[in-house]
Structure formats: C-alpha cells, structure tokens
Amino acid sequence: AGCGSNDTSNSGKGNETASDKLKGEVIMDGSSTVFPIMEAVAEEYMAAQPDVKVSVGSSGTGGGFKKFIAGETDLTNASRPVKDEESALLDEKGVKYTEMKLAFDGISIVVNKDNEFIDKMTVDELKKLWVDNGSVKKWSDIRPEWPKEEIKFYSPGTDSGTYDYFNEVILEEKPMVENATLSEDDNVLVQGVEGDKNAIGFFGFAYYAENKDKLKVVSIDNGKGAVEPTHETIKSGEYAPLSRPLYTYVSNKSVAEKEQVADYTQFVIENAGELSEEVGYVSLPEEEYKKDLEKLNELKK
Amino acid sequence: MLEPKQTDTYSVQQLILEKKSKKRWNIEKLIPKLLFLTAVISVLITIGIVLTLIFETFIFFEKVSIVEFLTGHKWLPFASTPSFGVMPLVVGTLKVTVIAAIVAVPIGLATAIFLSEYASEKTRRIIKPILEVLAGIPTIVYGFFALTFVTPVLRDIFPSLDMFNAISPGIVVGIMIMPMIASLSEDALVSVPKSIREGAYALGATKLETTIKVVLPAAMSGIVASIVLALSRAIGETMIVSVAGGSTPSMSMDVTNSIQTMTAYIVQVSTGDAGYGTTIYYSIYAVGMTLFVFTLIMNLLAQFISRKFREEY
Amino acid sequence: MKLINKNHVVKKMPTRLAVNSICKGLFFLATLFGLLVLAILFYRILTQGIGHLNFDFFQNFASRRPEEAGVKAALIGSIWLMAVVTPVSLLLGVGTAIYLEEYARKNWITSFIKLNISNLAGVPSIVFGLLGLTVFVRALALDRSVLAAGLTMSLLVLPVIIVAAQEAIRSVPRDLREASYGMGATKWQTILKVVLPAAIPGILTGGILALSRAIGETAPLVVVGIPLFIAFLPQSVMDTFTVLPMQIYNWTSRPQEEFQQVAAAGIIVLLALLILMNSIAVIIRNKFQKRY
Amino acid sequence: MTLTGPKKAPTVGIENENADSVFLKETVYETSDLNLWYGENHALKNINLDMYQNEVTAIIGPSGCGKSTYIKTLNRMIELVPDVKTTGQIKYRNRNILDQSYKVEDLRTQVGMVFQKPNPFPKSIYENVIYGPKIHGIKNKKILDQIVEKSLKGAAIWDEVKDRLHENAYGLSGGQQQRLCIARCLAIEPDVILMDEPTSALDPISTLKIEELVQELKKDFSIIIVTHNMQQAARISDKTAFFLNGEVIEYSDTNTIFSNPNDKRTEDYITGRFG
Amino acid sequence: MTLTGPKKAPTVGIENENADSVFLKETVYETSDLNLWYGENHALKNINLDMYQNEVTAIIGPSGCGKSTYIKTLNRMIELVPDVKTTGQIKYRNRNILDQSYKVEDLRTQVGMVFQKPNPFPKSIYENVIYGPKIHGIKNKKILDQIVEKSLKGAAIWDEVKDRLHENAYGLSGGQQQRLCIARCLAIEPDVILMDEPTSALDPISTLKIEELVQELKKDFSIIIVTHNMQQAARISDKTAFFLNGEVIEYSDTNTIFSNPNDKRTEDYITGRFG
Ligand SMILES: Nc1ncnc2c1ncn2[C@@H]1O[C@H](COP(=O)(O)OP(=O)(O)OP(=O)(O)O)[C@@H](O)[C@H]1O
Ligand SMILES: Nc1ncnc2c1ncn2[C@@H]1O[C@H](COP(=O)(O)OP(=O)(O)OP(=O)(O)O)[C@@H](O)[C@H]1O
Ligand SMILES: [Mg+2]
Ligand SMILES: [Mg+2]
Ligand SMILES: O=P([O-])([O-])[O-]
C-alpha cells in the first residue's frame, strides 16, 4: 500500500480558509467500520457548509474501492490498506489517490462475564486457540488448569476488515477453527458471547467499550506483559498487535478540481481525532494528522 | 312515448356518423402493440438477470472449476487456500426453507381454511389485512425479532441451541411467508364454487369433511402455487438469515448450529471487504446464478404440480 | 337390500361432530398465532422505540449522537423511491396484465411470457439488486440515484402487480364487457371505460401490497449501493438518497445501546407507513367491493 | 296483493283429507306457520304444508316467489346464507328440524338434495358416488362398490358410465352430471329427496330422462321438487303447491290444481297469463 | 332427428308473403344457410330466416337449442367466443355482416342488445346511458342531457330515476336495472334491438313492464327477442321462430305458430309435452 504519487510541482498557495460558501457534492463510500467516523465528520461539515451535499455510503472497504476505481466516489473509507489488486486496477484506470489515516480501532478479545479463569493470554495462546487443528477444542487444551469444556468461538464475518486484520496478525493466514460462529454484525457477537459461558470472541473496541458491563475483556501479552485494551494503550501503541489503523483514500483529481472536496478533506483531517473518539474509536497521535495535512496541501497546490 | 322527430334537431346516429370520420382504428391497432411491449419487458428483465449473472459467473468459472463449485463440500472463500464448493450454502438455504415450510404451510393453510370456511365475512375482512401487514413487515425487523426474541426463547427451552442457528431464522421466515400462503390459499378456497360445497353439505357432511375432502382438493392447484411462491420467497430471503443465522457455511444437517445461506453470502460480500475483481467478488454472481436456477426449478416444478393437481370444475 | 346400516351412521355422528369442532378450534388457533406474533412484534418495538419518537425525530438528519439522530432523509428518501416505483410498476404491470388478459393469443410467446412472470415472482430480491447495479447504475449510468434504485425496485415488484392486475381484470364479469361491445365500443374503449374502472380496486390493493414490499426491502438497495448518510433531500430523481430500512439496519449495527432505540423508533415509522398503505388498500377494497 | 296465509292452511288440510289416497300415506314433512326473513326481506310468509311419503310434491311459482328458499329450509341448507331468520316449525318425521338441537348433519343424512345446476365434485365418478357413504364411515371396498353400482343404476346412468367410473365427473354432459348428482344422493339411501329445478339447466332429452327417473324413484323415496315448468309439474307430481310472493296460494292434488284451480291467481299463472 | 333446413326456407318465405302485413314491411335481417360451429359442436344448422322492420320477432325453443347463439350472431357478439366458425350469410340491410370487412363496431352501433341478466356498468345511471353516445364521440353536455332524458323516458324508467340520475346503477332493483339497460341501448338510437331472455331474471311485475315496453318500442325499432317463455312470445311478438337442436323447425306469424303449428314438434313443445 502506498500513498498517492501525484507530485505535480505546483507550489505556493497555503490553506484556504473555508469561510466562503461552497457548493457541490462530496461522495464517499467504503468501510462500514469507518462509517460512523465519516458520518460524524459529514454531520459537522454540513453544519459549517450547508450547501455542500455530502453523502456517505457503507458498502464495505472492498465495495468502496470498487466504486473508487470506477471513479464514482471522491473519497473511499477503508479499514485496511489498499490491496495490491486494487491499486493495480486504480493505476490501470488512472485514478491517483492519497491515503489518510483517521483513527485506531483496537480489536478486543472478550469472554463471558462468568468466565473466571481467563484474564490474560499471550499471542501464541490466542493463535493456538483460534487456528484450526481439525479437532474440537477444550479450554484445557490451551492451559491444563483451565476447565475441560468445549470452547465456543465468535468471530466477525470472514469478509470484514476486522476478520482480515485478525487473520493477518493472529492466525497468520491459517484457517480459523471450523466451528467458529461468524456474524456480520458485531452487536450480534456481543450477544453471543454474553449468552454463552464458554464463549470467546473478538470485535471492534467500540463494541466492547459500550458493553463493558456485560463482557469480560482479555488482556494480551505480546512479550511485554499483558495489556488491556483501553483508549490510552491503543493510542500509544502499547496494545499490540491488535490495534489497527483506519483510513480514508481521497482522489487527487477530486481534490484538485473540486474545491468542496479539498475543503472537506481538510475538515476530515482537522476533526477526525475528536470525532472518532466520540463514536467509540481512538484518535491517532497529533503527528499523524499533521502528516495527513501536509499531504493534502501538496495535492492542493 | 319516444318522440325522436319532435323538437330534436339532431339524430344520434347522424352525430355518430359524423364523428366516425375521426379514425379510431389506428389506436386500436397501436394499443395492443404497446401493451405487448410492456409484457415483453418481463422477458427482458429475465434476460437482463441471466446476462448479468452469466458474464461474471463465467469469469468465476475460469478461476474455479465448475465441478468443484457444484460438488465441493467446503465453502471457504477467504481461507489462504480457498475452496468454493457451494453445497454448504445450499444446505444452509434448504435448512431454513424446510423449517420455514414446516411452520408456514400448516399454519398458513389452517388460517386460510378458518378464514374461508369458518369465519364470518366480517372477521375475514378484519383479519386478512392484518395478516397482510405481517407479510409486509421489513425483513430487517424480522431479523432482529428472530435474534433477540425467538432465539432466546428457544434457548430457554433447548439450552444446547447455539446463538446462531437455522431454527430461529427458519421459524421467523416461516412466519413471514405464512400470510402469503394464508392469503393466496384463501383466495383459491373462496373461488371454489359454492355449489360444490352445497353438494357435500347436502349429503350430511360436516364442515370439516366438506373442506378436507371436497374444497381443498378442488383448490389444490391454487394452494400449491401459493406454497411454491412462498417457498421461493423463503429461499430468497436475505436479511433474516443474515442477522439470525450467523455466517458459517456448513454441510452438517444439524439445525442447532450456525449456518450461512446463499443470499446471506451475497450480502456479506456485497457489504464486505472483498476486493474488486477478486475471485470472491465473482463468486457472488455464481452463487446468485445458483439461486436463480434454484428458484427457476422450483417454479417449473410448481407449474407442473399445479397442472397435475388441477381438478377442473 | 339396504347397504347402509343406519345405526352405524348414527353411531358415528358424535365422533364426526367432535372432530369437526376440534379442527375448527385448531384452525382458529392457527389464525390467532399470526395475530399473536404480530402483537408481540409490535409490543417489543413500541416499548423500545416510542421514547425516541418525537417531532425532532422527523426533523433531523442522521447523526452520530443518538439523541439527535432523525429519519428525515430516510423517510423522504423512501417517499421519493415510492414516487418512482408507483408509476413505473403500475404502468408496466397493468399494461402487461391487460395484454395478457385481453389481447394475447394462445401461443407459445404468451405462455412463455406467463411462465416468465411467475418465475420472476420467485427470483430473490438480492438478484434484482445485482441486475439494478449492472444495468441501471453502471450501464445506463444513472448512478446511485432515486431513478436507478426506483427502477430496480419497480422490476422487483412488477410480477406481483401483474398477477394482481390479471386477477382483477379476469374477475370483471363478462356481461359488462358484452354490454360495452354491444353498444359498438371498440376493444380498447371497452377496456379503458369498463374493464379497468371495474378492476381498479383489485389492481390498487395488489399494487399497494407490492409497494409496501418495495418500501421495506433492504437487500437490493444494499447491493445497488445507495449511500447511508445523507444530510440533504433529493431535489430530482437523479439525486442520490437513502431509505428507511437501510437507515434502520445501520442503526442496529451501532455499538451504542441508544442507537438500538433509535432503530426501534425508525421501525415504528416504517411500520406506520406500511400500515397506512395497507389501510388505504383495505379502504379501497371495502369501498369498491364488487357490486356486480 | 296481501293474502291471508293462515286462512289458507285449513283449506289445504281439508283438501288433503279429501284427496283419495291420503289415508294410506304417512306424513314426512309438516310445516306450520313458517316465516322466513333474509335480513329485512320477508321471503316466506306463514307457510303451512304437509308432505307425504312416496309421493312427488311439486312446488311451482314465478321467479322470486320463494320456492328455492322453502326447499332449502327443509334441509336447513338455508343456514348457509348469513342473516336468515325463521319462525314457526317444520316437523320432519315428527321432530322439529328448526330446533337448533337437531343436528343438520343428521337431518341431511336423511334428506338428500339435488340442485339446479349439476354440481358434481371435481373427482372421479366413483368417488363422487361414494363420497357420502365414506364420510359416514363406510370403508369396506366391497360394500362401496355395491353402493356405486346400485346408486348409478338407481339414477339410470349406470350403463353410460360403467366403463369410465374412474374418470373425472366433469367429462360428463350436463344431463349425465345431473343424474350423477342424483346417484350421489341415492348412495346414502335417504328418506326424502329434495330437488330444486333439477332440469332447468338441461336439454329436453336429458330432462325427459330425469322426469322418468323421478317417477321411478318415488317408489322408494319421497320427493319434493321445485320447478318453474308447469308442464313438468303436471307430468310428474302427485301434489302441487303454488307459491306467489312468499305465500302458498294453493296446495292440492296436481290434477285439481291444473284442471280446476281454486284461486284466480293460480289459474292466471297456469294459463300463462303471467310469470 | 335430422331436419331439412333448406327445404324449410321456401315455406317460411311463402308463409311470410301470405301473412297480412308483410307487403308493407322492409326486411331488416335476411339469414341464409347459416351454419355455426363451436369447435366441433355444430350449434346452428342451415338457418334461413327473414326479419322485418317494426316487428317483434320472437325466438323460442328448449334450452340449448341455439337461441342465444343465433341472436349473438346477429350482432357478431359470437366472435367473443374463441373457436367459432360460421358459413352462410346474414344480410343486415342488404349487406352481409359475416363479411370480415364489415366493421363490427359499425354493426353494433346500428344493432343494440339487451342481455339476460341486467348488466349495467358500475357507474351512475346517467353515465350508463351516455356510455354509448360518448364512446362514439358525442361530448356536448346539452345533447347528452337530452339523450339521457329521452332514452330513460323511452325505457319507461324516467320517472323512477329522474331524481337520482347520479346515483350508482346498482342501487336499482333488477327490473329497473334491466330497463336501464334498455335505455342505455336506446341512447344510440339503434335500428334493431336484440334481446336475449330479457325478463328471465326478473319478477312477474317487472316482466310485465318490460313486455309493455317492448310493445311500445316496436313503433320505432325492430325487435328480436329470445325467450324460453312461450306465453311471453305469444303475448308480445308478431312472428315466432321455433328452434330445436340448432335448427329452425318452424317460423311463422305468432298466431299461426301458437294456434295452428305446422310441425308436430312445435306443437309438442308449445303444449308443454317437453322442454
Ligand atoms: N341469499 C339471499 N339474500 C337475500 N335475499 C334473497 C336471497 N336469496 C333469495 N332472496 C330473495 O328471496 C326471495 C325468494 O327467492 P328464491 O330464490 O327462493 O326464489 P325462487 O322462487 O327460487 O326463484 P327462482 O325461480 O328465480 O329460482 C326473492 O325475493 C329473493 O330476492
Ligand atoms: N361458448 C360455447 N362453447 C361451446 N359450446 C357452446 C358455447 N355456448 C353454447 N354452446 C353450445 O351451443 C348449443 C347452443 O347453445 P345456446 O346457448 O345458443 O342455447 P340457448 O338456446 O340459448 O339455451 P338457453 O335457453 O339455455 O339459453 C348448446 O349445445 C351449447 O352447449
Ligand atoms: Mg330458485
Ligand atoms: Mg341462451
Ligand atoms: O466494512 P469493513 O470493510 O470495515 O468491514
């Protein structure tokens, strides 16, 4: 994954202050994970620029890229970096783009509230737990002192960014346990784990944060001691390897040609941190947004 | 009494003759052609669907062998070594459909019989539209009903039931299609001529005997048609199974486990993460095609059955 | 020479009557079942969502804050969608029905069209979504507009309307047609002035039921990919928009508990719309109940 | 236009007693002071009629006079119409059938009915005939076969259909269908057979066949037949009742009615001055 | 059973010429050698009939003999039945209507029809009457008003409905509905009026009214009426044709037919020996 490479050598103009009234459309689609952030941004932006028509779709990261490649959207949201196939197609279609980071999502591993024996796990244990070995797993298979009861697995659908990320860093592309229960809807997973004494599951941090009283979170030991997912640990990068960045990709052409898109993108960068916190994600360190802003200014030249 | 040649300065026939010069005949010739065109649109839609599906399906079959697709027993499109055997999705779809049928057919038919044979005209007029509301409730609403009401209730009764299973969405899909069976079958029952019923009553038959042995067989073709239509709806139902069925493709015949249906898979990929142009992307068209062929076969079967059952009167 | 033993017949009678009563009870229970489910459904949704239902809910666009989230864009969007679906599907549906009932000769083309329509009635809605995406959004470049989505939905409900209209047209008594022909009316005049007016209640009830399906469908629009967040209203059929069921779906998948109530409130609005449409259908049906 | 129905009753009684064969025959139906309303519409007014065993009783009268209503009351088929109200009583074999404790199913097992339009079930000829016996619990195949043969012979249609018993009844002509309906009715060996214009939808030849059949059947059954065809009534019935506007204008031996009617209106109707 | 239809024709002609008033009247319909099949079913056989202006021609015969089929052929309504085949010709005002170049719409504008069951449109009384004029392009409100009044008066129903012209026609009684249908037919001032058992669904009083009306109408129109009621034919018609099994058995002055029929079968039918 790389950022846009549209280095036309125009220099000069600084930030336009968006006080003048803008019109036109800003069309966005992409990740359903990122959607709440973009919804919040769009909501605020419409308050500032009521004549700009901002629409945000939620067709998933892949679906978003589909439209982005076809040139149907100005920005596309992604819960993972662009894939090689996608970037090849983007090149083919001549779509130049720039990647911006918006926030972190910490993937939380949770168990049932009544589970008394787990409070932390190592990454290796996680892997042992989740990777398929052809047999039915009991807790005691992981640690002998744990009960001899069958584990119930809950995971986001295989086509989600969260699964994708988990697959990459924990499963390392090996198949997940076959009897895992998958669902597209994280709320549904919350209910699953909540209602099942021997359940373990994972999903976005926000879903844990909102249901703290119903679930028990598992701290993850990545060699540096067990870390519980919290705002701070995710933001600081301590909670590793399960915190992942969320992105938006903006079309360079749209920024250059449409004043409102440029203005909106700037607004996104300036407000993403605060607003992502509000909807349940974790903001990036300030430097990240500065970098984004610089990239944008490059484009606007 | 009739005094046409009195004060009138006109004769209707005369007036008609004058107007006749305006040619109507063109419209008469044009209209059927226009209407024919609208009728042909339905055919165009089908062609459109088939073409849409077929192109992308072909690309899919360049990547995955059609034999594997049709006979494989594993549907793991996202695995590092993906496998695309559609059977688990088909099994998931069938499980839901069969459960839905078990719920909807008896209840729907019993309702139809109650409304057409036992209920008063007034009751009928009140209940039928209420049931039709049931058929029109957005499926997404049903989905959460299944997940947050039916599943917990079932789990209270059978604690071994998984959070996601085939039973709960199956029952709820059944509830959704039940009014369709009830309403259409009721129409079929009502249209059985009264004289045939009278024939049975006059022999001392009770209402039940009349209904089961005379009216029901006479209306059978309409009833079969309604059931098939409803089951096609069940096969094609998406949101309920997506929400309450989980998304685990499985070959097992166990209905207490999580499943995935063909439709749920399409939605999963449509809203998901799959890259454009990937095998997964094309797989939804292949699954869509399978679904289409499925409903096609169902309908042809229905036509055949209903022709067979038809008792002329 | 009596083959029937009257005593035997008399003895059987009480059993038969009892079975009759028991089955009547069962049939009645089955009918109640449907009503009961409906009641539970309503009760749950109402208790969950009623608190959120106020004037602001209709005035606000979607929002990240549950207390400020509203259905304005989605409700208006749904109405716009109906504004496209209604004329398109009725025109095509009734036209087809008239053709099939009044003009079509018995030949293979006709039976093929008929077979085709009954097949379409069973095609999953999601497949129509794939069609709409490929044909309207992409090929005809209508984008994710009201028009593209409306046409997709029209196709989806078309078979239902055709079948209802056929039924209605068929049930217009022959003597009315004969009366019209007897006056020297042409076929089209007869259809337009006699058959259609008499068939209108049936057509409308079928139509409204079909439209209430269209208003509650989510899957095809998800596939077509209409956006979710919109804080403006469409000005023309070429504008983009969102609809109630998609908005509801989105709310239900939010992590915040409060959004579940917002979703329930949205469902109440959708159900109210649905019941309104059904009631209109019932009123039409009762008002124009066949008088012939 | 108003006629004093009640006053009529004694006349009828007397006439019957005067009739020659009456003392031999048992009464099947005794109707006394029967009134019937469809909602507000007073369709039968003070009907008093007695009907006798092994006779053909014809009911004639112009359209809408209440013939069908009356005959449907005799097996309580009228209850299928919503909003019907009756007063008075109809005694069948000395028990009041209008009493709700009288099970209609019992009544109709005794009293068969043949309708204006042939209404066979959309089943095979065989199944049509055994429908009645079967619902009454007769399952023995041999007995059923015998019933089918006997009933079809009784309805004078056996020869025409014996080779196609398992074909659909709708393949028969109208007249054959009507005789099948009669056979279906005979299969439960009723006591009385009601017929509501059984020939009005049939061609003359079929009509003739059915008329002959009725003559035959009265040896074993009591028959009450509605007809709008006075000639038919004259040809086949023993007694005739003339209805007008829901009242019995005259009831008497068929010969008397046709040769020497008591009432001016009867005469007018019979001579075709109206109706 | 087979009857030589063609041989009949001259007889009819001669008889007509013998009839007293014939020399005054113009021929409206001349049917020659008409045959009609429904699929395989030969429903009309060698029909030869002439019908005259300002006369009432009655067609009688038992059920299924082809009366309705024949009268529907006279305005080609029969074409609505699929699979009908005709041979021979029917001349209306000297032009063969069975010729496909004859536009049915033109024919039916000249030849009105009244049906067995009253079939008003589910519209207001007013709209029912103006239906015909309107489809033929007459839009002038004043003319339409005049037409309504004139037609309703012509059908002897004006007084009963003049205050409720804009109410739904289904609020009328059966007899009124039938007269409304006649009015609707009069509204286009046809030349001939065909009536297929127009009173068979009506009560005696309504029947009487319509019979009177027919007598009135024949001053201005030629009327062809099908009836299963011989008395009715005798009461109102000038000529009567007796159909049997799709053939014309006898056609003559009504008086002749009823007092002195030529054919044994006619006599049998008229005296009620069958049918
Ligand atoms: N279901 C009904 N509801 C209301 N009124 C009815 C009903 N059936 C018949 N009537 C009325 O009752 C009266 C008697 O009707 P009935 O059918 O008994 O006459 P009928 O003598 O059998 O006539 P027809 O010779 O036409 O069969 C008529 O005025 C009729 O309009
Ligand atoms: N649509 C049709 N298709 C086939 N056969 C028909 C059709 N209509 C009538 N027939 C047959 O044609 C013959 C004449 O029928 P038609 O209706 O002319 O008789 P009718 O004299 O008018 O009898 P009715 O007095 O019962 O009205 C009958 O044998 C009938 O079965
Ligand atoms: Mg009757
Ligand atoms: Mg006829
Ligand atoms: O919608 P996602 O791509 O973020 O799962």
Image (tube, coloured by chain):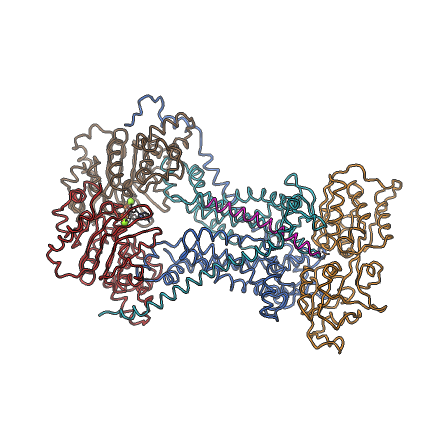
Chain colours: A orange, B blue, C cyan, D red, E brown
Q: Quadrant of residue B273?
A: bottom right
Question: Percent position (x, y) of residue E46?
Answer: 25, 43
Q: In this orientation, which residue lies closer to the viewer: C101 or D194?
A: D194
Image quarter in which the C terminus of chain A is found: top right
Residue E159 rendering spot, x and y as whole percentages: 31, 31
Residue D78: x %, y % from top left: 31, 54
Q: Is residue E16 above or below residue D206?
A: above
Q: Is residue A156 above or below residue A91?
A: below
Magenta residues (range): C256-285
Where is residue B213? Give x, y as percent.
37, 62
Question: Looking at the image, can residue C140 be seen?
Answer: no
* Displayed quadrant of residue A130: bottom right
Q: Main secondary structure of the magenta part?
A: helix
- Is C260 in the magenta? yes
Q: Nearer the viewer, residue C135 or E158?
A: E158
Does residue E152 appear in this view? Answer: yes
Image side of residue C63 versus residue D247, left or right: right
Find out whether residue E6 is within the magenta segment.
no
Q: Nearer the viewer, residue E128 or A280?
A: A280
User: Which image quadrant for residue C59?
Assistant: top right
| Front residue of E189 and C271 | C271
